[in-house]
Image: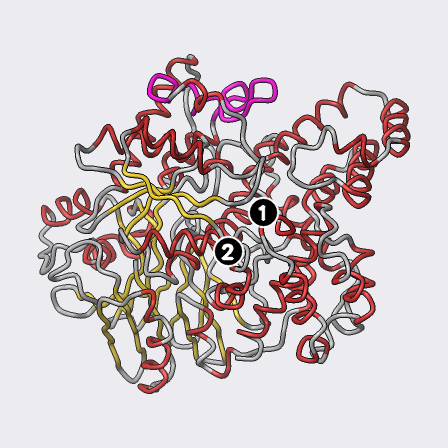
Amino acid sequence: MCGICGFAGMRDDELLCRMNDHMRHRGPDGEGVFVTDEVSLGHRRLAIIDLATGGQPIYNEDRSVVVVFNGEIYNYPTLRRNLEARGHRFATATDTEVIVHTYEQYGLDCVKSFNGEFAFALWDKKTRTLVLARDRLGIRPLFYCRWGSRLAFASELRSLLCWKQARGPLSTKALGAYLTLRYVPRAGTMFDGVEQLPPGSYFVFQEGKSRTVRYWHARAAKLAPRSTKDWVEGFRDLFIDSVRLRMRSDVPIGAYLSSGIDSASIVTVMRQLTSLPIQTFTIGGFGAGVDESAEAHALAQYLGAEHHALTIESGQFELLPQVMASMNRPIGDAIILPTWLLAKATASRVKVVLSGEGADEILAGYVHHLALSTGQTIQRVTPDALLRLGRWMLGKCSDKFLNCFFPYPAALGKKGKQKLINFLDMLVRHDVGQQYLQLACVFREQDKRLLLAQGSYEASIADTFVLDLLHNALVEGESFFDSLIACDLENWLADYTLAKQDALSMDHSLEARVPFLDHRLVEYALALPTHMRWRGLQSKVILRRAMRQSLPRKTASVKKKAFYIPFEKCFNKKFDCFVQDVLLSRRCLNRGIFNQSYIERYTSRVRSCELIENKQIMSLLLLELWLREYSDF
């Protein structure tokens, strides 16, 4: 893994140097540049494959094509053999070099040949064309900004902001979407004028003109009908091959391990594919109902792994400013702190780690998948009058009673209860978009009207923006549930899950790989019949069946735990003062984004122990910490 940057339509050697230096953590093992009056490319290297000759930029035979590359092309040995058979000559043993030769052979369609996780910038001297490309799922980031006939790009926002033209105003549209979802969807950023190349796309810039082309969509593979046994065997074969490819490395490799089936399946396959010791890593200290460290330790013993456990400390919330400095966009989830700490500890022992990210997205493992699917069934078979009665009865239930049925280490609370009532209202209205929004939102539209100062709020634009995501994902002839998964893959996965993982791991020069997101496996999973996804309330049926002969029975059947950080339990009481000092500071209030009276109300309830309020407080805190690093850059 590496960092790339550069620009076209100008020359500024000092700017290129500063942009490259801001990504030193992404590539501490080397740097390289390519500079002409038309285009400049920069690269920071984290050496993983071909340690001796893999430095960048990389050229073709006559140096008319040059590339800087962040990521891995896992099928590069096969591509290389095919290209050599067609007469291409290679000068290195690195996967990067297959990019320039595949481009020579197939042009812009080269991206369709790559199985991997990547973002690259390629300059074609003959046609005077700059090509930016990003992998199908958006595993690796790539930001860019246009200014007239000039263009700048970088793997990280902080690097891009070295170019003063990229420092646009805060986007009120993105702000509203963040407060709704705790992240900015649709490859957006917090600044007007700064964009992120969407997953599965390439961008062509030639003589001041540009176009973006989508070369891959999250759609099911076209497969013939098959038996349950054949579905399971096909999934298992693809999963094993994906893990095998992602174990390619010339440096030490490990894996994250929790008590769940996703990470356990990865480590199990790794154990089958190598006789070398496997190092596994986990973090705990979150309290009863959340902490999985004991189960992870037992699972590691069963799998014969060399296990390393880390415990979060009650005062480590003080690291949150440093954590947010590593984020390209704000993500309002306390999980970023343990993820950052785990990556730091892991990087002290290995350079590459395999992670279970993506399994919930492709196999419909999230609570909202079950809730929306169940809601659709209820909506079809239940008269509206009965739904209204259920809504009335829910309103009469006490918060304490409802908490008995709430599977989170936090109270449902009044706001959580209202969220359920609103969800039932949308069932009566048969409005699936609003059903999704009611489950996903942290701040409702009426909350944002009170929270945001005049000028920071655009009426209804944020929630309309979110609803559009679902509508754009709907495909004629495709079920709502399939469209929902496609929507999550193109937004939640790329802009929350993967954005978080890339930033937090690369801050410690650690490459995190995701076997569940091999595009072949994703397309296969999207073609699964419903009974291979869900059985009653149990999710990931096909993964459980594929791995049940290799895992302990308890692990193969364990229910997914909602990974929530109860900060009122994890952090000491100094955290209350920390929140107040940040959100009620002159620095925060002088931005003019928030209404002070409403902020004061939140900061007085840091230890309310209610789920929605805790998420709202953490979202506001992390947003302000992020703005200090990037808006004040």
Q: Are marks 1 and 2 in contact (CB under 8 Å)?
A: yes
Q: Residue 552 location, x and y as percent?
A: 39, 20
Q: Is residue 227 above or below residue 578?
A: above
Label disc, if present, on residue 262 of the rendered structure: none
- Identify the secondary structure beneath mark 2: helix
Does residue 92 appear left or right of residue 236 in this picture?
left
Q: Mark 2 points at which residue?
A: 337
The residue lying toward the viewer, choosing from 6 and 630, is 630
Does residue 119 appear left or right of residue 404 in this picture?
left
Choose the circle earlier in sequence order: 1 or 2: 2
Give the residue drawn at x 33%, y 77%. 21
Q: Residue 158 location, x and y as percent?
A: 45, 73
Label 1, label 2: how far apart the Cα atoms are: 10 Å
Q: Quadrant of residue 41 in the image?
A: bottom left
Numbered range of the magenta stretch: 528-551
Q: Mark 1 points at which residue?
A: 565
The residue lying toward the viewer, choosing from 26 and 193, is 26
- Identify the secondary structure beneath mark 1: loop
The residue lying toward the viewer, choosing from 527 and 554, is 554
Q: In this view, does 72 lie above or below 559?
A: below
Q: Is residue 100 magenta?
A: no
Q: Quadrant of residue 439 in the image?
A: top right
The residue lying toward the viewer, choosing from 378 and 625, is 625
Q: Which amino acid does label 1 sit on?
A: Ile
